[in-house]
Each structure stands twice: as C-alpha cells, then as structure tokens.
Image (cartoon, rainbow, N blue to C red):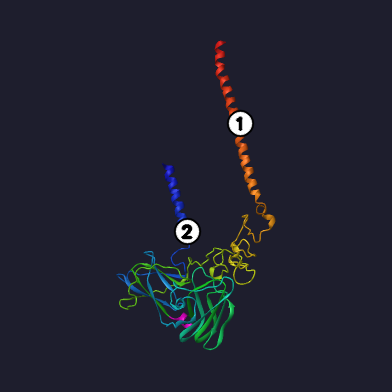
Amino acid sequence: MKKIKISFTIFFLLVFNIVLAQSAGQEPGYSFRNYADISINKNLMKSTSVVELDLGKTPYNSFAVYDLGNGRFIPSLLFKDYKEPKLQVLSGGGDNPEALTDKSYQSFSSFDTDGQNMQKSEIVLNIEPESSFDAIKIILDKNVSLPNYVLIYDTNNAQTLLARSPELSNIIKFPETKTGQIAIRFEHIQPLRISELEIISKKSELAKKRLRFLAEPGNSYRIFAAQDYYEPIKYSEAPDLYSDKDVIKLDIKPAFKENPFFKELDSDNDGILDKNDNCVNLPNPKQEDLNQNGRGDACDDFDKDGVINSRDNCPSEPNYAQTDSDRDGIGDACDKEESRILEKYPWLIWLGVGLVVLMFLAMATVIIKKKPEELNKNTEENSKNSASPTQNNFD
C-alpha cells in the first residue's frame, strides 16, 4: 500500500511539473514589455470604488490592469491631456484599411504576395489636424515578419522623409516633420498583416496620462504597459469609467520596470524573432537566402513549381506532382537513372517476392520433416525409460 501511495505521489508531482513547465512564459500580460505594481490603502476607501491613477508623462500608450488578489484582468480607461490626431487611410491599405487606424490590436489588414516576387504595398494616410511627428509605429499581427523595405513620403510638402531602407524595427524613425498627409510604401516578399499604424510625436510622449479602473480596498494591482502585439485578454464586465462622480484619485507614482515574462514571438522556435525572420513558419536559424530576394531558402521556391524548397524533392527541377517512383526522397525529375534500379528493372521486385516465398517454403518443409523425426526419437526414448524398471525387478 505504501508503494502505491509513493508511486501516486511521484506521478502527481511529475504531472504538476509538466503543467507548470507548459504554463511558463504564458503568465498574464506576457505581450506587454513593462509593468508596475500598486496597492490600495484600506484607509483610502471603505468600499469598492473607481480610482484614477496618475501615470505622469509616461511614453507608453497601451495599458492593461491585472487584479492580483482575484487573478484576473479588469477593464480600464486611459485619459490623455494630449488629443491624438485622427488618422484615416485615403488609398491602399490592404484588404481591410479601416483596421489600420481603429485603435484595436485585434483587427488587421492583409497585404498578400505571389510567394515569389517582392510585393510593393502602399498606404496613403491622412492626418487631421496637421501634426508634427518623427516616427511611425507598426503593430504587426502574430506570426508575421516586418516588411523588407520601407519608404515614407510627405505628400503635402513633396519630400522624402525616409528613403528606401531595410526595416529591422517596428518603430520607423525619420526627421521631425509637420504634415497632414504621408504615403508609406512597404516592400515585402512574405505576406504582411498589420494591426495598427500609429504616429509618434514628442507631444504625445510627454503628455500626461491617467488610468481609471474599479478597485477594492486593500487589494493589489499590476499595471501592464507597452503592448508589443495583439494577444486576447478576457476581461470582466466593464463598469462606467467615464463618469467623474465619486472617482478617488490615488496618490501613487507607479514605477514601471521591464516585464520578466514578456515574450517576443518566435513561431517556428528557430531563435529568430518573427518580425525579423525571413521564413516565419519554418525553422531556419542560419537565415540562408542564396538569391538575396528577402525570402529564406527554406520557404523559397527556386524552380517555381509551387512547392517550397524545404518540401520539394527536386528544388532545382520543376515537378509539381512530386513523383518519386522508388521512394528514395529524390523526385524522378532530378533522380539519376542508376539510382532507380527498380524503375529500370521492375521484374526485380517480383524476383525478390519470389525468393522470399521460396525461402519461406523451404523453412516450412524443414520444420515439417523435422517434427516426425523428433516425435519418433522421443517415442523410442520413452520406451527405453519405461522398460528399465522391469529389468531391475527380474534381477
């Protein structure tokens, strides 16, 4: 009984450790780069109330509040002293242009490619009122890499803000400009999905921000900031956070620090982040790109037969059907004749089958002959053994 209990305990611990390991990196708020913890003093309020947290001049523009006491995300509302300009897509913008400026990371617009050539996708963006800014932030959907090249043009002032340059970051910086309209051209060889476009200005970064949420006296909360990509968050039902009535202002200055559980996306686990990976969904840690077209060799298609190299049994010879008669992993289109003996001499297959059958029959025949001989031998030995005691009696 003790052994059973010990075994059950060990089994339980193993399962617990496996579950714990699987949940690692999936902590609440792992899509946010920063966080700050705060506690609500019991003496400040006697009952559940809406509170307002002064965030000061923080550069962050996205926040989420996590209730540490109840272990769940709760609704919050952000206020800014600076009114953000309204963005509108005038032309281009992929298959869902409205998604680029709807202030939601959940929606996105897609920009497809033919899978072979560099695609040029353009967006003409209207900015109202005319504003000064020096950067644009691209919020990508999950499992997507950044475009290969970006060019930004100020259409109002007829000047190039950023010449065609390789893009290694989702924040594109250029000399500060004041304009009401810009054109953005993305060059990409992989499909591109953009959740949001944001302009970044010094006024926006220096604007005072306030965050409201429903709090309980004596409870603690974690304020997550700077969401890097969209990740679904399940919230409880939202209270009225717009009303200024009975709002308690907190005298707390949150100190934001790096989120240790922040996880940048690497869908294929090859050590290269999705946004910089030239082949997002197939592992290629060396990022080989022989033809220098921006698409990694692993997901490129050198022979243009519709099958990517890593799955093509003849990457340099068109063979859409992927025929491989001898099943040696090399397609017939590029397989050498001498390595396909069975294709050249198909009768060898039947010869092999015949030889196996003959061997089986030969073995069966030997076994059948051997059994009667062994039976006779055993019978004789039994007869001798039974006769021995009789002879002893006569003696």
As drawn, the label of residue 22 is: 2
Name the residue furthest right: 338
Amino acid at pointer 2: Gln
Write the start and end of the magenta stretch as one range: 202-207
Q: Is residue 388 above or below residue 52?
A: above
Q: Secondary structure at mark 2?
A: helix
Quarter of the picture holding the C terminus? top right
- In the picture, measured across the screen, residue 167 lies left or right of residue 203, that is right
Question: Pointer 2: residues within 10 angstroms few (<14), some, or many (20+)?
Answer: few
Q: Is residue 316 above or below residue 372?
A: below
Quarter of the picture holding the N terminus? top left
Q: Secondary structure at mark 1?
A: helix
Percent of width and height locating residue 76: 38, 73
Spatial CA distance of label 2 from label 1 is: 62 Å
Q: Is residue 218 above or below residue 86?
A: above
What residue is disc 1 on?
A: 369
Quadrant housing residue 28? bottom left
Please state which of residues 277 and 199 is positioned toward the viewer in this rendering.
277
